[in-house]
Image (spheres, rainbow, N blue to C red):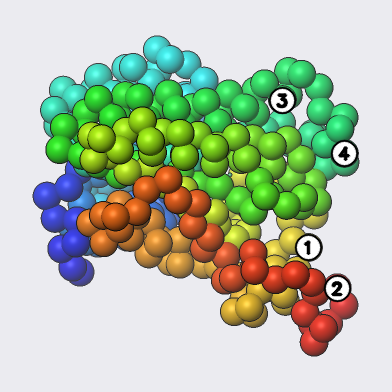
Amino acid sequence: KGNLMAGKRGLVMGVANDRSIAWAIASACAAQGAELAFTFQGEALGKRVRPLAESIGASLVVPCDVSSDDDIDAAFAEIEKKWGKIDFLVHAIGWADKQYLRGRYVDTPRDAFLKAMDISVYSFTAVAQRAAALMKDGGSILTMTYYGAERVMPHYNVMGVAKAALEASVRYMSTDLGKDNIRVNAISAGPIMTLAANGIGDFRYILRWNQLNAPLERNVTLQDIGGSGLYFLSSLSSGVTGEVHHVDCGYHVIGMKNPDAPDI
Ligand code: NAD
C-alpha cells in the first residue's frame, strides 16, 4: 500500500461488477489512499456495487443513469453535500444496442445511433461539466476508449463511431478546462472480457487475435488498466492532458498479422 493518492477524493462511474474496468481503476486508487464515491446504473447493479464499495471503505454510493440530466444532477448534489469538492473523476461507461454490434455499420438506424452517442459520448461531457465545477483545486478526468475508434474492428460498428467522437471530446474538453488545471485524458484499452464486451459479436475471436498479434504476445489485464488509470488520476501525469493513451500490449503499432502466430 502506498500513498500516491492520499488526501484525494474521486468519483468512479461505471462499476457493474468486479471485472469492470472502473473497478480495476478504483482498486488501484484505493490502494494508494484515495477516498472514493461510486455511482451505479439501476438497483440490480446497486446490489453488486455496494458490497464492492464497502470493501474499500467508500464514502458514498449513489444511483445515476447517465441518460438522465436529473440523475446526474442528483448524484453530483450528493457528492457536493458530502465532500464540497473533488479531485478526480472516472467515466467508464459505454452502451450500444447489441443488435447493432454485429453485421454492417452501414445498417445502423437513427435511434440506435443516437442512443449509443448519448450514453457513450455525451454522458462524458455531461458528467465532466458537473465534475469540473467541483474541482476547486484542479483535477483529473479520465474516460475509456478502444482502438475501434481509429481502425475498423469487426462488429464494433456504431461503438467505433461513438468512441471516435469520445476521443475528440477529450481533446476539446482538455482545452476548455486546462486553465483551471483540470486534465482530461482517455485510456484506449485492449480487449478484456467484461459484461459490456460480452455484447460484441465474436469477442472471443478478437481476444485471441490480439493475444497472438500484440507485441507483448498477451492480452491486457485489469491490473494493467488499473495501473495506467492510477497514473492519469495521480500527480505522476501532472503534465499530461488531451491524451488518448493505448494500454493494449502494443497492439496498435502492428501493421499486419504476426507471421509466427498460428491460424485461428
Ligand atoms: P462493464 O460492463 O463492466 O462497464 C460498463 C458500464 O457502463 C456498466 O457499469 C454499466 O452500468 C454502465 N452503463 C451503461 N449504460 C449506462 C447508463 N445509461 N447510465 C449509467 N451507466 C451506464 O464493461 P467495461 O468493459 O468495464 O466498460 C467500461 C468502459 O471501458 C466502456 O466505456 C467500454 O467501452 C470501455 N472499454 C472496454 C474494453 C473492453 O474490452 N472491455 C476495451 C476498451 C474500452
Q: Is residue 218 above or below residue 121?
A: below
Task: Read off the residue under disc 1.
Answer: 205
Residues at marks 2 and 4, CA–CA distance in whole angstroms = 22 Å
SS assignment at label 3: helix
The type of residue carrying mark 3 is Phe
Q: Are marks 3 and 1 in contact (CB under 8 Å)?
A: no
Q: Nearer the viewer, mark 2 or mark 3?
A: 3
The quadrant the C terminus occupies is bottom right
Q: Are marks 3 and 4 in contact (CB under 8 Å)?
A: no
Which is nearer the N-term, disc 1 or disc 2? 1
Residue at screen point 32% across, 33% down: 177
* Relative depth, front residue between 37 and 168: 168
SS assignment at label 1: helix
Which is nearer the N-term, disc 2 or disc 4? 4
SS assignment at label 4: loop
* Relative depth, front residue between 157 and 79: 157
